[in-house]
Image (spheres, grey):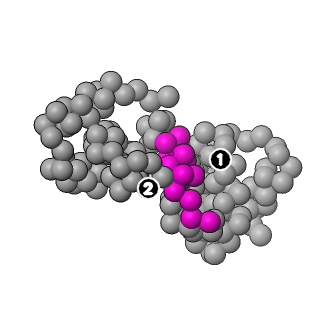
Amino acid sequence: MNCKAAVAMLVLVCGLSQPASAGLFEEGSNAWDRGEHTVAIRIFRHLADQGDPKAQNKLGTMYQHGWGVPQNYLDAVSWFRQAADRGDADAQSNLGFMFLYGRGVARDYVSAHLWFDLAASGGNRSAVFARDLVAAKMTPAQVAEAQKRARAWEPK
C-alpha cells in the first residue's frame, strides 16, 4: 500500500479529520480503477460526508448503476442532489437524467429541464443536448417554468 492509501485508511479507520482533498479523491478513483471497490467506496463516502460534491456525485453514479454497491435509485438521487445543490454540473446533469427517466423520483420534465439547464450553464456539454431534447417534450409553459426555477436557483 502506498503512502496516500495508508493515510486514507488511517483517516477512515481512525476517524481522523482531514479536509476533503483532491488527493484523497484521486486515491479513491485509483482504488476503483484497481478493482478495490470497498476501499474506493469508503474514501468517497468519507469525502461525501464532509460535503465534497465530486465524491457525492461519484457515489450517486455507483448507486445508480450498482457498481460496488447494490443498485439503488433513491440513494443515487440523494447523492446527486447533495452535489447538485452545491453547484456540481455533472451531478446536476445526472439528476436531470433521473427526473427525465423517473428513476428514484417521479418523472418530471420541468425538473429535468431545470437541472439540465443549470448543468449546461456550469459547462456540462451533454446537458445542453439533453435539455433541448426534454424541451421538445414540454409545453411552452413548462419550459418557461423550468427556466424561471433555474434563474431563481442558488447553490446551498
Residue 109 spot, x, y in % from top left: 28, 45
* Residue drawn at x 57%, y 64% as measured from the top left: 71
Between the residue at mark 2 and the residue at mark 1, the CA separation in whole angstroms equals: 25 Å
Quick check: 15 above or below 144? below
Query: What's the magenta region?
Result: 70-83
Q: In this view, which residue lies farthest toward the right?
A: 14
Check disc 2 and report its element: helix, strand or loop: loop
Please, what is the three-letter code of the amino acid marked with disc 2?
Arg
Q: Can residue 95 be seen at all in this image of the molecule?
A: no
Please, what is the three-letter code of the amino acid marked with disc 1?
Leu
* Residue drawn at x 22%, y 50% as measured from the top left: 134
| Pointer 2 residue | 103
| Pointer 1 residue | 47
Q: Place residue 87 in its image quadrant.
A: top left
Q: In this view, which residue lies farthest toward the top?
A: 152
The rendered magenta stretch, by its main secondary structure, is classed as helix
* Residue drawn at x 50%, y 28% as measured from the top left: 156
Check disc 1 and report its element: helix, strand or loop: helix
Horizontal placement of 49 versus 1: left or right?
A: left
* Residue drawn at x 21%, y 36% as measured from the top left: 142
Q: Magenta stretch: residue 81 in it?
A: yes
Q: Place residue 84 in its image quadrant.
A: top left
Q: Earlier in the sequence, mark 2 or mark 1?
A: 1
